[in-house]
Image (spheres, rainbow, N blue to C red):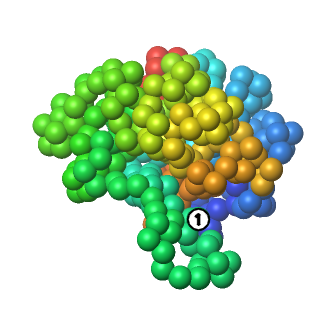
Amino acid sequence: MKPLVYVTRKLPEEIVARLKENYEVDMWSKEDVQVPREVLLEKVQEADALLTVISDRMDEEVFAAGKNLKVVANMAVGYDNIDLDSASRHNVAICNTPDVLTDTTADLAFALLLATARRMIEAAEFVKQGEWKSWSPMLLAGTDVHHKTIGIVGMGKIGTVVAKRAAGFDMEIIYHNRNRHEVAEEMLGARYCSLDELLGEADFVVCLAPLTKETKGMFQREQFQKMKKDAIFINASRGPIVNEEALYEALQAGDIAAAGLDVFNEEPIGADHPLLQLKNVVALPHIGSATKETRIAMMETCCDNLEAIFADRAPKTLVNKDFLSYRR
Ligand code: GLV
Ligand code: GLV
């Protein structure tokens, strides 16, 4: 009998066709609506594998219900939606999709930085609303990006290629990370700093750190107050790294100049979200990796990982490497 894969979001035909070559496939029918918790809890009881997205909370209750579950292929580089200890205890392999989305996500992070600095969203709206009356000396004047200092918080793969883009804009690059990144230092001239030093020096503070116990709530009012008054804050990793009320207050009080956000504490946000009421906020709906090429590549990576697990090979992008020690 073919293993049963439950897919928690409607995926394109070509991916479903690939999955059907090797598995029985059951799939949630909607692309833009999350699978209800009770459906997930029911489906996991029979499934040998799950293909999940970041809005699926994979906790002890899910793993305990998944009697046959061997692998979860999460279509994201981040896996803060998954309780890894619980997965390992239940002997479930967790795989993610790093690498294929690195450049794409870095492009978006840098585009968000540019859009925020140069007020591009506000300016585009201005034209569309028919408000453009004449060329004016200070009309929608933003702030320069080139030759400024970028402070990258989280110098992983994505942070490193954001630094590469920054180097092309003649920016000075400083970074804060758990570990030193010698390649970035040598190739890009990036300078390691403490978080406080970075906050005090950077014109652009760009958050690309994964969400962990250590990074949750890392940006409070105190951190924003340590930034320059004309600093711009960019978050393209995970919302809960930032205390949103503190960010709102900092933007209103003029502790910092603007923010570009691709991620939020609780997604999705509605039009009534306080941050959206501020003119100096550019908000995007968590689209860091959202290009057609990259989203397909992420799905293909999920398929590769499933195939490896069912062929008893080591998957390419296993997250909970300790699960092997629980293997019977
Ligand atoms: C998306 O946010 C991801 O982690 O891939
Ligand atoms: C982690 O998100 C990375 O930078 O690859």
Q: Is residue 258 left or right of residue 56?
A: left
Which residue type carries mark 1? Answer: Glu
Answer with left or right where residue 139 lies relative to residue 36.
Answer: left
Give the residue drawn at x 38%, y 23%. Answer: 195
Residue that carries the numbered disc 1 in the rendered image = 122
**Residue 313: percent from the left, percent from the top?**
41, 39
Which residue appears at 62% of the width and 25% of the height? Answer: 83
Task: Tell me if the residue at label 1 has its CB under 8 Å from ligand 1.
Answer: no
Q: Can see residue 6?
A: no
Q: Is residue 100 left or right of residue 91?
A: left
Question: Which residue is at a point 74% across and 60% down the rendered structure image?
Answer: 32
Q: Which of the 4 image quarters holds residue 85?
A: top right
**Image location of residue 246, percent across then percent down:** 64, 29
Nearest to the observer: residue 256 or residue 325:
256
Quadrant where the C terminus sits is top right
Task: Classify 305 as above or below 328.
Answer: below
Q: Quadrant of residue 49?
A: top right
Q: Residue furthest front?
A: 137
In this rendering, the answer to whether 272 lies above or below 128 is: above
Q: Is residue 292 or residue 305 the one in the foreground?
A: 292
Secondary element at tag 1: helix
